[in-house]
Image (cartoon, helix red, strand yellow):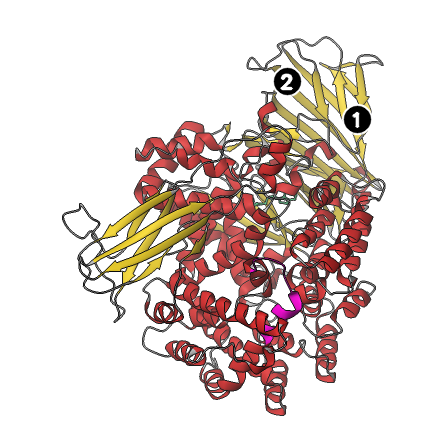
Amino acid sequence: PQAIYLKDYTPPAFQIETVDLDISIEAGFACVTASLACQRNPAAADPSASLVLNGEDLKLESVRLDGRPLGQGEYVLCADQLMIHAELPDSFTLTTVSTINPDGNTQLSGLYRSKDGYFTQCEAEGFRRITWFLDRPDVMAKYTVTIHADKAQFPVLLGNGNPVGAGDEEGGRHWAKWEDPFRKPSYLFAMVAAKLDMLEDWFVTKSGRKVRCAVYVEPGKLDQCGHAMAALKKSMKWDEDVFGLEMDLDHYMIVAVGDFNMGAMENKGLNIFNTKYVLARPDTATDIDFQNIDRVVAHEYFHNWTGNRVTCRDWFQLSLKEGLTVFRDQQFGMDMHSAGVTRIQEVRTLRTAQFPEDAGPMAHPIRPASYAEINNFYSATVYEKGAEVIRMIHTLIGKDAFRKGMDLYFARHDGQAVTCEDFVAAMQDASGLDLTQFKRWYNQAGTPKLLVRGAYDAATKRFTLDVEQQYPATAYEKRLEAEGRAVARGAYHLPLVIGLLGADGRELPLRLAGESAAADTQRVLSITEDRQQFVFEDLAEAPVPSLLRGFSAPVVLDYPYSQADLTHLMARDSDAFCRWEAGQRLATDILMAGVAAFQAGSGDTLAWVPAGYVDAMRALLGSAFAPGGDPALVAEALMLPSEVVLIEATEGTVDPDAIHAARLALRRHLANELKGPFAAAYHELKIDAPYSPEATQAGARALRNACLSYIAEVDDAESLALLQNQFDSANNMTDSMAALSALAQFASPARDAALERFLAKWKDEALVVDKWLQVQSTSRAPDTGARVRALLDHPAFDIRNPNKVYALIRAFCAANPKHFHAADGSGYALAADAILQLDALNPQVAARIARSFDRWRKFDTQRQSLARMALVRVQGHDKLSRDVAEIVGKALE
Ligand code: HT7
Ligand code: ZN
């Protein structure tokens, strides 16, 4: 597919001041009249350029210029563009009338039908599927929309901004008019015509304005939206307290829809959400679901300033709003829940989704230089690594300067469409720190490696840290080079946050050579060179360095820790991330030895598990019950690195069977050796209070269910009874799913009975049915591949619903390496079949599934040839979407 380049950006030839829409929902189609008040853009490169509007799947009925109908020859329709050839004054109103088919819109982009009515999704380029427009984010206009629809079927009519009129029409129809006082890009337009119930509440802003908050959901689900409403009000308060940012509209609406490609959408004043991030009741949603709702509601709300008030000049700048808003929702999460656990979960997501992306064919910097299909760049890199880049600025310049930088950014750019450079300039100007080198993070792809070596000299009482950064070219740079567009790569500027631990666990004072006094026990080292040395003085003993505290930079750290060092850090480091990280590193080292042993045929002996590991894990479990213990953190630390993380950590050819075998053997070993402590903890952590998703209870449940999952590995009558008992008696979905997921790992009558009962109970709750699908698609049980194939034809599955596709197919491909990478290629074939079927319906979702093949070259030759066959089969399909063609093309390059 044809690529679009950042270097080719030019300002639009016209600006659109106002957009007046009239959208009439009829039986089987919708009629859209759009009046655009246009002006020539004085900043345009070509002052006489003609007006070229984007449109997709629109049937043009008529075009008028300042009221005059345009005839043949005065406009041309060609390849999704409407070109106006008539002579244009400097200001004019262009009115188009088009019909569209929302009922046949399976892509879920533009205006589409879902169960309860009609909804829109315009980011990134969906507005052009509603009407002809300059559909690019640097065209910012004021919008009004009048919606007409049948009153009985679609009693709720919503738009952005404020309601300014409503009434009845002939034939049982009605209308409503909405006006948004803020200028916005077209991707933030939204409308809804549906039958929905509504929960209403009020938020008084710091300046005393009353904002009406409303959550709209499918009829009958009002008892599932209280948590989302509370999250919204908490977010509003937090943004005022932390960033001084106030809600600017009188209405803030959230509408939940079951058919949605992503998580949610920040349309101005009218957010549209996937039901997954709104609906929750203790018996239908897990603790993690409740926490995700907090985060997604906050994320969309925070976009009101970082994204909506200040938006992106072009889609290459996507991380300007996404990286920054993820950073803001992460900070909110750290303030609302346990900061350490939140950070650990973020790092886990980064390593599971972003590190592989950076190492694969879709590698790109947080601001890519080109794309074929922008929807493919709503990526872990743009979002998650983008947030890490913002976090590094925060760490380098400090919290106060960061806040000043944000204030300056809004003062300079409110109401504008800007670039990542503009953001960094505000941070630089507010802090005084030169961020020129730092900007490499925006242009270079790949996960840098930080090689750190420490040496203690008892005679001089000095500890020397040598730091080297490596940043080899990725697929992205290799492609640029092949296209003759190579860019110079250079060292990154990054913060390395460190501490030094004494033998007794004490944090040692840190004085660098040349300094007069020790500054602190934790320091931010500013890394800017390929190689740097730091010498710490006055250390009476050899310290164990605690490196990359709080995961201060998105790098792979290489330090030759001994197992004793890791056990020490795991037990004593004051930094929660580093404690967890030491445990993960220890487990990874052990598991890599286990993989080698399984490949050599000696895995079952467990000789690769070092003496002392079980005791370290026993101590870890015990620490949850010591004064100041944090059960949630211990639950995280008990979890061994996932198979996906181990695949990434493998240098050379990956053996997914040996990885699976080693990990399972270690889990079983721990389960047998610590059977007593796990059972005792499980009973001790029983919660008698009524269910609450708040952090303390959720943390206790997380640890209790981590214990349960180990107990299940013993696989005897006693453990089965415990699982069965929890499954039968659970009064909340967290406990119910923990039991079901443990049962689902074994192909057994108990599993089959539990799955059957679960579905019978929850068949009418779509989000719970998704859990039922996912627990099966992620099972290690030997019959999983066949079951997933069978489930594709089950009435509970629907290929048109993205949540179902993600639960059954994406989870199988992305979170079940043992079965997806089955040696006979059956997993690859299943994915290829699904991609082709999906591509005809919903290319965005198909492309997301196609990403499952990103790492195919890491596997053995037999698997590689089977994966290649699957990819070639997909690529050879005629009428392949641009979305899938880009992913598969890059995978096969
Ligand atoms: N900004 C929103 C992105 C989004 C989206 C993008 C492409 C296709 C469908 C989509 N739905 C939502 C989500 C966010 O980051 O807040
Ligand atoms: Zn976002």
Label 1: state its secondary structure. Answer: loop
Res 539 → quadrant: bottom left
* 244 on left or right of 679: left
Dot 1, how many residues are within 10 Å of its Cα: few (below 14), some (14-19), or many (20+)?
Answer: few
826 versus 510 height, above or below: below
Question: Which is closer to the viewer, label 1 or label 2?
Answer: 1
Q: Badge 1 is on which residue?
A: 79
Query: Which residue lies at the image location 54% right of the left edge and 39% below the top edge?
Result: 365
Tell me which amino acid carries mark 2: Cys
Tell me which amino acid carries mark 1: Ala
Residues 717 and 19: in front is 717
Region in magenta? 650-664
Majority SS type along the magenta span: helix
Residue 8 appears in view: yes
Seen from this angle, which residue lies furthest left?
A: 516
Q: Badge 2 is on which residue?
A: 38
Mark 1 CB within 8 Å of ligand 1? no
Residues 629 and 535: in front is 535
Residues 470 and 672: in front is 470
The quarter of the rendered structure image containing the C terminus is top right
Disc 1 versus disc 2: distance between alpha carbons?
22 Å
Judge whether residue 661 is colored magenta: yes
Residue 866 locus on image (x, y percent): 77, 57
N-terminal-most mark, 1 or 2: 2
* Count of all numbered marks drawn on residues in the image: 2
Residues 804 and 605: in front is 605
